[in-house]
Image (cartoon, helix red, strand yellow):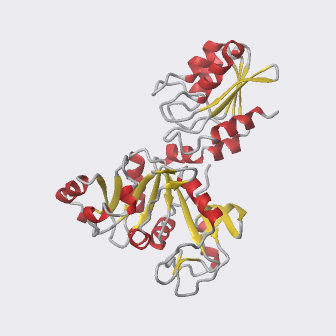
């Protein structure tokens, strides 16, 4: 039995619930039997190791602990997991991957070894890195992991010439979209998508929930706070401030205070009105502990993030329909003069969702510069 696989599956159950913390699963094994298991369920809650060890109780003494990420060794919102592991008498710890967080990196392993515990590292390491690709990226860059999601026709259009996009994708694809929303910290759209679709950007699965943080790019702030308050996106931002990104020249103190009265937060950034500094947007979102960001359109948003090399992963839902040259394309001009200079996706998987294709891939920018998780 592959106990690390079980630990990975336990961690995966809480995707989207632990941010800004990583996904972690743990299993305690004694004499070939699982005597305790657990996962980190929410930020500030017990870590996976604590859940597993508490369930194991006295059986933890002399047992082996399998954990998907190096146990923490510092005081945060909870005590160090290494202290708990040592105290319970675990004899061996099997770790999938080291924690990239400088507060932990290799220090937790060294504490366990110093206590006489046998430590083995690297079991299902690749799988563990993919599990926590968001966390690893955020720790390394202090910016959110960016996922672009789009429903497209066979000829690469995201809407008709009039801006109508309902519904390009089928029911199965739309369910998958809501699953994606449920797994991220924030969703970002552009002004045109807001006007054309008036989206709520909520999560509609077994029940309707507010979902992640909502963010809209409105460069000139030419939609008033009062107008925004009448839109669906505002009605689904009751506990989280609606965030508007604009050009810094439009964000005077008086204007910011005016939006604040409606519980709308303004993030001013530099750049030009046509090309806001998207990396600065990600930096400021990272400072708010937003670790993952889902782009949901439109073409200007996808294009600006793509040209900056700041999209990590794509989810395309392609439907067997043709819209024609007068439809709205997923991307604006990229100035690609040869196929060799095109943007490429790597580690691509393609799944059938009814009559739609779900295409998932990681961005590799031109000239071989990789954006894949390390």
Image coordinates of residue 99 in percent, x first then y, are: 58, 35
- In this rendering, does residue 210 appear at all? yes
Q: Is residue 60 left or right of residue 143?
A: right
Q: Is residue 348 left or right of residue 239?
A: right
Q: Residue at x 71, y 63 (%)?
A: 350
Image coordinates of residue 306 in percent, x first then y, are: 51, 66
Q: Residue at x 38, y 52 (%)?
A: 237
- Residue 63 higher or lower than 329, as above or below: above
- In this rendering, does residue 280 appear at all? no
Name which quarter of the figure residue 258 lies in.
Answer: bottom left
- Residue 349 higher or lower than 74, as above or below: below
Image coordinates of residue 38 in percent, x first then y, are: 64, 29
Q: Quadrant of the N terminus?
A: top right
Considering depth in this image, is 177 or 190 the residue closer to the camera? 177
- Residue 352 higher or lower than 132, as above or below: below
Q: Residue furthest front?
A: 207
Q: Residue at x 64, y 44 (%)?
A: 131
Image coordinates of residue 18 in percent, x first then y, are: 53, 39
Q: Is residue 70 left or right of residue 275?
A: right
Considering depth in this image, is 286 or 61 the residue closer to the camera? 61
Total marks placed: 0
Q: Residue at x 70, y 44 (%)?
A: 127
Q: Residue furthest left?
A: 254
């Amino acid at each position: 039995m592959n106990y690390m696989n079980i630990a990975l599956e336990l961690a995966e159950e809480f995707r989207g619930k632990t941010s800004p913390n990583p996904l972690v699963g743990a299993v305690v094994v004694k004499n070939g039997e699982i005597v305790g298991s657990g996962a980190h369920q929410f930020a500030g809650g017990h870590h996976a190791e604590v859940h597993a060890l508490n369930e194991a109780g006295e059986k933890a003494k002399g047992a082996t602990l399998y954990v998907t990420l190096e146990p923490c060794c510092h005081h945060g919102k909870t005590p160090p997991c290494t202290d708990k592991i040592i105290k319970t008498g675990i004899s061996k710890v099997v770790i999938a991957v080291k924690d990239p967080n400088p507060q932990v990196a290799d220090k937790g392993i060294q504490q366990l070894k110093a206590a006489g515990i046998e430590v083995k590292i690297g079991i299902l390491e690749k799988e563990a890195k993919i599990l926590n690709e968001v966390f690893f990226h955020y720790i390394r860059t202090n910016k959110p992991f960016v996922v672009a999601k789009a429903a497209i026709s066979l000829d690469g259009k995201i809407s008709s010439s009039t801006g109508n996009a309902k519904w390009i994708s089928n029911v199965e694809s739309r369910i998958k979209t809501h699953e994606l929303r449920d797994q991220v910290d924030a969703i970002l759209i552009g002004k045109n998508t807001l006007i054309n679709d008036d989206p709520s950007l909520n999560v509609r699965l077994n029940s309707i929930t507010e979902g992640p943080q909502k963010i809209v790019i409105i460069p000139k702030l030419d939609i008033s706070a009062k107008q925004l308050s009448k839109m669906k996106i505002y009605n689904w931002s009751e506990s989280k401030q609606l965030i508007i990104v604009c050009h810094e020249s439009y964000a005077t103190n008086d204007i910011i205070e005016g939006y604040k009265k409606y519980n709308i937060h303004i993030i001013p950034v530099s750049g030009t009105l046509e090309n806001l500094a998207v990396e600065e947007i990600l930096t400021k979102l990272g400072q708010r502990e937003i670790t993952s960001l889902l782009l949901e359109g439109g073409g200007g948003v996808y294009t600006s993030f793509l040209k900056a090399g700041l999209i990590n992963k794509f989810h395309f839902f392609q439907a067997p329909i043709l819209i024609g040259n007068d439809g709205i394309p997923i991307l604006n001009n990229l100035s690609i003069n040869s196929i060799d200079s095109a943007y490429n996706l790597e580690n691509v998987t393609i799944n059938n969702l009814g009559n739609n294709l779900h295409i998932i891939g990681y961005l590799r920018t031109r000239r071989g510069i990789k954006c894949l998780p390390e």
